[in-house]
Amino acid sequence: MPIPRSVARFNRRVTNPLQRHWADRLPGFGLLEHTGRTSGRTYSTPLNVVRTSSGFTIVVAYGEHSDWLRNVLAADGADLTYRGKRYALTEPRLVRGDAAAALLPRFARAYSHAVGTESVLTVAANG
Protein backbone atom coordinates (compact mmCIF):
# COMPACT_ATOMS: atom_id res chain seq x y z
CA MET A 1 0.00 0.00 0.00
CA PRO A 2 1.48 3.39 -0.98
CA ILE A 3 2.16 6.20 1.47
CA PRO A 4 -1.18 7.65 2.71
CA ARG A 5 -2.62 10.68 0.89
CA SER A 6 -2.52 12.66 4.15
CA VAL A 7 1.28 12.39 4.10
CA ALA A 8 1.29 13.47 0.46
CA ARG A 9 -0.77 16.57 1.32
CA PHE A 10 1.61 17.43 4.18
CA ASN A 11 4.65 16.98 1.95
CA ARG A 12 3.10 19.12 -0.79
CA ARG A 13 2.71 22.03 1.64
CA VAL A 14 5.71 21.60 3.96
CA THR A 15 8.42 19.21 2.80
CA ASN A 16 8.36 19.80 -0.97
CA PRO A 17 9.04 23.56 -0.77
CA LEU A 18 12.18 22.76 1.25
CA GLN A 19 13.30 19.91 -1.01
CA ARG A 20 12.98 22.09 -4.12
CA HIS A 21 16.19 23.84 -3.00
CA TRP A 22 18.33 20.74 -3.49
CA ALA A 23 16.32 17.94 -5.19
CA ASP A 24 17.53 18.94 -8.65
CA ARG A 25 21.21 18.42 -7.75
CA LEU A 26 21.45 15.32 -5.54
CA PRO A 27 21.75 11.76 -6.88
CA GLY A 28 18.55 9.78 -6.54
CA PHE A 29 16.35 12.88 -6.66
CA GLY A 30 14.96 15.05 -9.40
CA LEU A 31 12.69 18.06 -9.71
CA LEU A 32 9.77 17.32 -12.02
CA GLU A 33 8.07 20.25 -13.74
CA HIS A 34 4.60 19.36 -14.97
CA THR A 35 1.45 21.18 -16.05
CA GLY A 36 -1.86 20.79 -14.23
CA ARG A 37 -4.51 18.92 -16.19
CA THR A 38 -7.29 21.41 -15.49
CA SER A 39 -5.56 24.50 -14.10
CA GLY A 40 -2.82 24.74 -16.73
CA ARG A 41 -0.54 25.83 -13.88
CA THR A 42 3.09 24.70 -13.75
CA TYR A 43 4.13 22.66 -10.72
CA SER A 44 7.56 21.55 -9.44
CA THR A 45 7.59 18.26 -7.56
CA PRO A 46 10.69 16.70 -5.98
CA LEU A 47 10.77 12.94 -6.63
CA ASN A 48 12.96 9.87 -6.26
CA VAL A 49 14.34 9.04 -9.70
CA VAL A 50 16.76 6.53 -11.17
CA ARG A 51 18.73 7.31 -14.33
CA THR A 52 18.51 4.62 -17.02
CA SER A 53 20.20 4.23 -20.39
CA SER A 54 17.20 5.71 -22.23
CA GLY A 55 15.69 8.01 -19.61
CA PHE A 56 14.47 7.68 -16.04
CA THR A 57 12.46 5.45 -13.76
CA ILE A 58 10.44 7.35 -11.17
CA VAL A 59 9.11 5.73 -7.99
CA VAL A 60 5.36 6.27 -7.55
CA ALA A 61 5.50 6.53 -3.75
CA TYR A 62 2.06 8.08 -3.15
CA GLY A 63 0.06 5.83 -5.44
CA GLU A 64 -1.33 6.08 -8.92
CA HIS A 65 -3.74 8.88 -8.00
CA SER A 66 -0.88 11.34 -7.44
CA ASP A 67 -1.47 14.60 -9.25
CA TRP A 68 2.04 14.73 -10.70
CA LEU A 69 1.61 11.24 -12.22
CA ARG A 70 -1.80 12.00 -13.67
CA ASN A 71 -0.48 15.29 -15.10
CA VAL A 72 2.51 13.62 -16.78
CA LEU A 73 0.37 10.86 -18.28
CA ALA A 74 -2.27 13.35 -19.50
CA ALA A 75 0.35 15.63 -21.08
CA ASP A 76 2.35 12.68 -22.42
CA GLY A 77 5.49 14.13 -20.83
CA ALA A 78 7.08 16.76 -18.61
CA ASP A 79 10.49 18.24 -17.78
CA LEU A 80 12.92 16.98 -15.16
CA THR A 81 15.98 18.63 -13.67
CA TYR A 82 18.39 15.95 -12.51
CA ARG A 83 21.85 16.68 -11.10
CA GLY A 84 21.69 20.20 -12.49
CA LYS A 85 20.70 19.23 -16.04
CA ARG A 86 17.24 19.67 -17.58
CA TYR A 87 15.62 16.84 -19.56
CA ALA A 88 12.46 16.74 -21.68
CA LEU A 89 10.59 13.58 -20.69
CA THR A 90 8.49 11.68 -23.23
CA GLU A 91 6.82 8.30 -23.61
CA PRO A 92 5.59 7.94 -20.00
CA ARG A 93 4.63 4.38 -19.16
CA LEU A 94 3.27 3.11 -15.85
CA VAL A 95 4.73 -0.24 -14.79
CA ARG A 96 3.32 -2.29 -11.90
CA GLY A 97 4.25 -5.21 -9.65
CA ASP A 98 7.26 -7.43 -10.21
CA ALA A 99 8.01 -5.79 -13.55
CA ALA A 100 8.30 -2.43 -11.75
CA ALA A 101 10.62 -3.84 -9.06
CA ALA A 102 12.84 -5.35 -11.75
CA LEU A 103 13.44 -1.87 -13.21
CA LEU A 104 14.90 -0.52 -9.96
CA PRO A 105 18.41 -0.94 -8.56
CA ARG A 106 18.68 -2.56 -5.13
CA PHE A 107 18.59 0.68 -3.08
CA ALA A 108 15.55 2.03 -4.94
CA ARG A 109 13.81 -1.36 -4.75
CA ALA A 110 14.34 -1.34 -0.98
CA TYR A 111 12.88 2.18 -0.74
CA SER A 112 9.94 1.21 -2.94
CA HIS A 113 9.28 -1.84 -0.79
CA ALA A 114 9.60 0.20 2.43
CA VAL A 115 7.00 2.75 1.34
CA GLY A 116 4.74 0.01 0.00
CA THR A 117 4.47 1.08 -3.61
CA GLU A 118 4.27 -1.35 -6.48
CA SER A 119 4.42 1.11 -9.38
CA VAL A 120 7.04 3.09 -11.26
CA LEU A 121 6.85 5.48 -14.17
CA THR A 122 9.36 4.99 -16.96
CA VAL A 123 10.11 7.87 -19.31
CA ALA A 124 12.42 8.53 -22.23
CA ALA A 125 14.62 11.61 -21.81
CA ASN A 126 16.03 14.11 -24.27
CA GLY A 127 18.46 16.63 -22.95
Image (cartoon, rainbow, N blue to C red):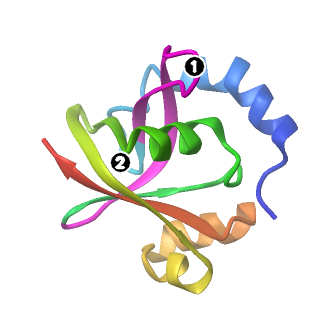
Left or right of residue 90, residue 9 in this image: right
Disc 2 marks a residue whose amino acid type is: Pro
- Density class for disc 1 (Cα within 10 Å; few <14, some 14-19, many ≥20) is few
> Of 32 and 111, which appears nearest the observer?
32
The residues colored magenta run: 30-53
Residue 90 x %, y %: 28, 49
Q: Which residue is mark 1?
A: 18
The main secondary structure of the magenta stretch is strand
Give the distance between the C-alpha atoms of the residues marked 1 and 2, in whole angstroms: 17 Å
Q: Quadrant of the C terminus?
A: top left
Kindly indicate whether the residue at mark 2 contacts the one at mark 1 (C-beta within 8 angstroms): no
Q: Is residue 78 above or below residue 33?
A: below
Q: Which mark is residue 121?
A: none
Mark 2 neighbour class, 10 Å CA radius: few under 14, some 14 to 19, many 20 or more: few
Residue drawn at x 51%, y 66% is: 108
Residue depicted at x 21% and y 33%: 86
Give above or below for 40 relative to 70. Answer: above
Is residue 38 highlighted in magenta?
yes
Q: Quadrant of residue 98?
A: bottom right
Q: Element at badge 2?
A: loop
The quadrant the N terminus occupies is: bottom right
Residue 76: name its quadrant. Answer: top left
Q: Secondary structure at mark 1?
A: helix
Measuring 68% from the left and 25% from the top, which residue is drawn there? 12
Considering only order in the chain, which callout, 2 or 1, is on the residue closer to the N terminus?
1
Residue of label 2? 27
- At label 1, the amino acid type is Leu
> Residue 16: image x %, image y %?
60, 25
Above or below, 56 against 43 in this view is below
State left or right for residue 65 relative to residue 57. Answer: right
- In this rendered view, identify the residue nearer to me: 83 or 79: 79
Which residue sits at x=68%, y=71%?
A: 113
